[in-house]
Every structure is written in structure tokens, then in C-alpha cells.
Image: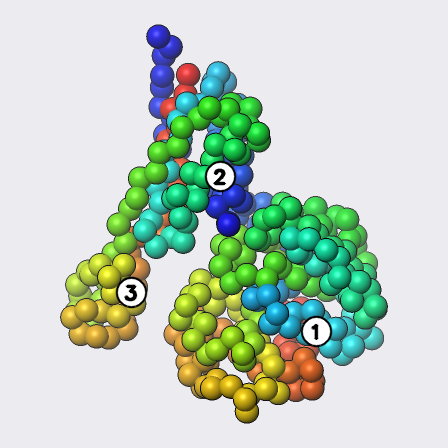
Amino acid sequence: MEDYRVIEVKRSIFEDNDADAERLRQALREENTFLVNIMSSPGAGKTTLLERTLEELGGSLKIGVMEADIDSDVDAKRMNDAGARAIQIHTGGMCHLDADMTRQGLKELGTKDLDLVFLENVGNLVCPAEFDTGASANVMLLSVPEGDDKPLKYPLMFQVSELVLINKTDVLPYFDFDMEACRAAILERNPAAAVIPVSAKTGEGIPEWCAWLKRRIQS
Amino acid sequence: MHELGIVFHIIRQVEEIAAANKVKEVKKVTLEIGEVSGVVPSYLEDCWKWACANRSEYMKSCALEIVTLKASSYCEDCREFYDTVAHGRTCPRCGGGHTYLVTGNETNIRDIQVI
């Protein structure tokens, strides 16, 4: 009969990822690269938002993009066409990125000469919120057709995001989307969150979003 | 399916502990999972066997035990605890929302059984 013994561990499942994320954040700070983790549902308009953002900021900042998807490289192609250095990260079936995958992606992208890197996380409102990627800022993109009740249904996503962009304001007349109710629900989950309504299609709110980014990079 | 990612993180941490303690094999891992942590125990168990068999060194036939921790919230106005799963963020006594989660969000590795 072999001798069993018990080792007390008592640590969070996320402890190693949180430590990886903190190291990555520190390394990015030292080389003056600002990493923005953008999270949303599939189809909320992350890639179109980034195309608009590149148009607006491409002249003043050196920008890279990492596109995380379960498969395909259609998004990275769109980013290359929009003038950014872009790579595609395949998560191999996983629904989120963790800090280690983010670090590997950044290494492949090469960040030394970049001021700003966007990480387009896997479209999903649940899992990406649980894994700290090591990003300098978390931004959540909600879109009008998804409904104003999402902050109530996916509270963690809204708690970990310092800015919520509400996209597709151009279709507001066709949906029962209550902007003020949505804003109140976001602030109830996260009183410190900033909220900016935007339309990546018409350009509404894009200057405010880019001004927020510039302020945040400088702070 | 964030459970697969979670299983990889558990394996990574348990393997580190196993190596540091010079164990031969890890026979069992006990987790503490809060009722409202968003981790689904049955999905975790589904990923467990495959991940241990294919992605571990010390955990090839490691058992998994999940201890579920009850979720409890506190109402600041009533100064009373209530059951989170039944009532969410709304206090069942006063109907108010000045409440916060006290327990139930845990995702911990409690201990490991080794030889």
C-alpha cells in the first residue's frame, strides 16, 4: 500500500494567470506600448470599429492589432488593409485568451516600435472577462441590437471594463434600446465605468473614443 | 467552454506543486467552486480526464473532487444575509438593491493528494 499524503494548496485557479498578466503589464509599461483588450459578442462590430479607429489615429500613433479567433484569418486581413500591422491568433477551440497566449501573440507581432496595440478578443461575453490578458485597459463593445439588458445578464464583463462603447447608434430608431437604462445598468455594475455611444458606420462618437484613448495612453 | 482553459490552468499549477514537492504522482485534486462563480462542475469534469491524460506528467489518472460552496449575499439596508441563487441582487426582505455577494464566487484549488 503506497503512502498517500495531502498537500494543502488553497489558492485561486486564476492565480498563475493573474501573475502572468501583471508581469506582461509591467513589461509593456516599460517599453511604452499601450495594450487595449477589446471584448464583445460576435457581430458587435469590433473589427469595423478598429477600421474606423485606425483611420482616425493611424497618422499620429503606430498601431498594431492582434485578432483572436477560434479559426480563420479574415479579420487580420481587414486590419492589414486598413494599414495596421496585424496578426491572427488562433485559440485552438478556446473561447478566450489568457495572459500567456497574449504574450506569445505580442512577441510574434513585435511591439518595440508600437505605441498602441489592440487585442480583439474572442467574441464572447462570459469567458474573456474571467481571464486577465495583461492589457493596459479593458474596453467592452456592446451594440444596440443586442439590447440594453446585457449589463444585467453578463455583470462580470461590465465590472472588468473601464470603458463601454455602445455601437450601432445609427440603428437606434429601429430597436427598443433605452440608452439611459443601459447606462444606469452599466454604472450599477461598475460605478467608475465610462460610457461612449458610437457608430462605427457613420463615425458618430469616434472622435470621443479616440480622445479617450489618447488621454488614457498619456496617463 | 472556459472550463477547458480553467482545467489547463489547474494542471499547470498542480504540476508545479508536484514537481516542487518531488511527488511520484498526483492521485486527486480537490477544488472549491462557488455556486455563482460561473464555472460549471459537469463541464469541468468532462474536460478533466482528457486534459490530464494528454497534457500532464504527474496527473495521468488523477481524480477530481469538487466541493460546491453556497452563495450568500448581504443586504446593507436590512443588515441580513440571503440566498443569492434564489434572489440574485435583489434583497427578498426589502426588495432593494443595496446588496453584495459575500460567498459563492470562489474558484480555488483546496488541496492535492499525492504519493
Q: Which residue is mark 2?
A: B47
Residues at discs 1 and 3 in contact (Cβ within 8 Å): no
Quarter of the figure with the C terminus of chain B: top left
Local packing at callout 3 (Cα closer than 10 Å; few below 14, some 14-19, many 20+) is: some
Q: Nearer the viewer, residue A212 or B82?
A: B82
Residue A207 seen: no
Q: Is residue A144 above or below residue A69?
A: below
x and y, in percent, of residue B12 in the image: 54, 34
x and y, in percent, of residue A64 in the image: 76, 62
Q: Is residue A55 above or below residue B59?
A: below
Q: Which mark is residue A48?
A: 1
x and y, in percent, of residue B57 in the image: 55, 24
Q: Secondary structure at mark 3?
A: loop
Q: Which residue is mark 3?
A: B88
Q: Identify the subunit bearing mark 3.
A: B
Local packing at callout 2 (Cα closer than 10 Å; few below 14, some 14-19, many 20+) is: some
Residue at point 61%, 70% (across, down): A43
Residues at discs 3 and 2 in contact (Cβ within 8 Å): no
Residue at point 69%, 50% (across, down): A90
Q: Identify the subunit bearing mark 1.
A: A
Q: In the current view of this chain or complex, which residue is farthest to the top?
A: A1
Q: Earlier in the sequence, mark 3 or mark 2?
A: 2
